[in-house]
Amino acid sequence: MTARLLDGKALAARLRARLAERVAALPFRPGLAVVRVGDDPASAIYVRNKDRAAQQVGFLSRTLHLPATTAEGALLEQIAALNADPAVDGILVQLPLPAHLRPEVAIAAVDPAKDVDGFHPLNAGLLASGLPGLVPCTPRGVMHLLAEAAVPTAGRHAVVLGRSRIVGRPMAQLLLAADCTVTIAHSRSRDLPALCRQADILIAAVGRPELVRGDWIKPGAVVIDVGINRLPDGRLVGDVAFPEAAARAGFLTPVPGGVGPMTIACLLENTLEAALARRGLARAAA
């Protein structure tokens, strides 16, 4: 068996094109503000990519770059100013923050209506309750990939490796809403290979390079690799051993070029939804 690749790069491009069409027809330009603290190199690249993508679809985009020594009170003041700015529809606090800053405090300070990362406790609660709200971008991107491939979800057993608030938990909630039977596995779970072999849909989001081996995968399963890890030799790999998985899975995301591009595209989708909702307009159709 040779897995069919789920091309997140191509799907993200189509999603951005649809968003650009929607934005071009609006009488206003949605505004996205990113708050970056410090000089983490990976964050700098990610923020630059977000800014470029936002401008390509017609958003007003700005990045607030604060020094690594910024006090928590000063950071919260900047977030409050963005909350009050009518030109800003979406606010994203880029993680990780310097060690002296508490990410949960910064995230909770963002207006939930502008929380386009979907991390605010209010939006997390809405998702857990099955109510409309802003959904974390990576899990939302995964659901787009499953829909694009016409992967049936009702009654399927989905196994999510990882229980983070950013990916694992919201991913499980979205799959539950799609009528999957969901198992969340993590570092304390017993016999991970056996759990993974039960999965019709396997989502790997643990941040451990090539943890998932080919013989962990049920033949024909859909495998979504959220991980991105840089090896000592400079190569980027996911949480799944790609060649082994490709010989066994039915569908498989590559790394890079799978889930990553969808995360940024869904950030833009969330920003448009937030902009429309703030003006009492319909939610974005992607």
Image (cartoon, grey):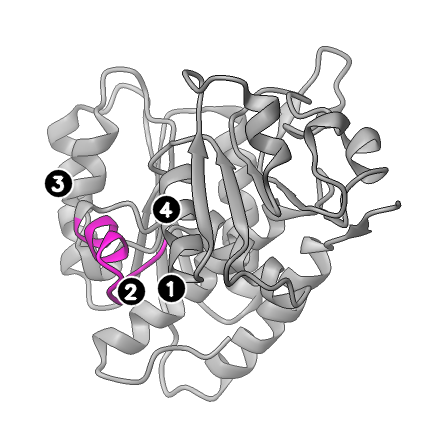
The amino acid type found where label 1 is placed reads: Thr
The amino acid type found where label 2 is placed reads: Asp
Task: Name the one closer to the observer, 234 or 171.
Answer: 171
Mark sitting on residue 170: 4
**Which SS class for mark 1?**
helix
Image coordinates of residue 69 in percent, x first then y, are 26, 19
Dividing the picture into quarters, in which one does residue 255 lie? top right
Asked if the magenta segment contains residue 125, the reply would be yes
Which residue position is annotated with label 1? Answer: 271
Asked if the magenta segment contains residue 33, the reply would be no
The amino acid type found where label 4 is placed reads: Pro
Q: Marks 2/4: CA distance?
A: 22 Å
Residue visible at 55% across and 22% down in the picture? 192
| Mark toward the viewer: 4 or 3 | 4
**Which SS class for mark 2?**
loop
Identify the mark nearer the N-term, 2 or 4: 2
Q: How would you rate the neighbour count of disc 4 (Cα within 10 Å): few for under 14, some for 14-19, many for 20 or more?
A: many
Which residue position is annotated with label 3? Answer: 77
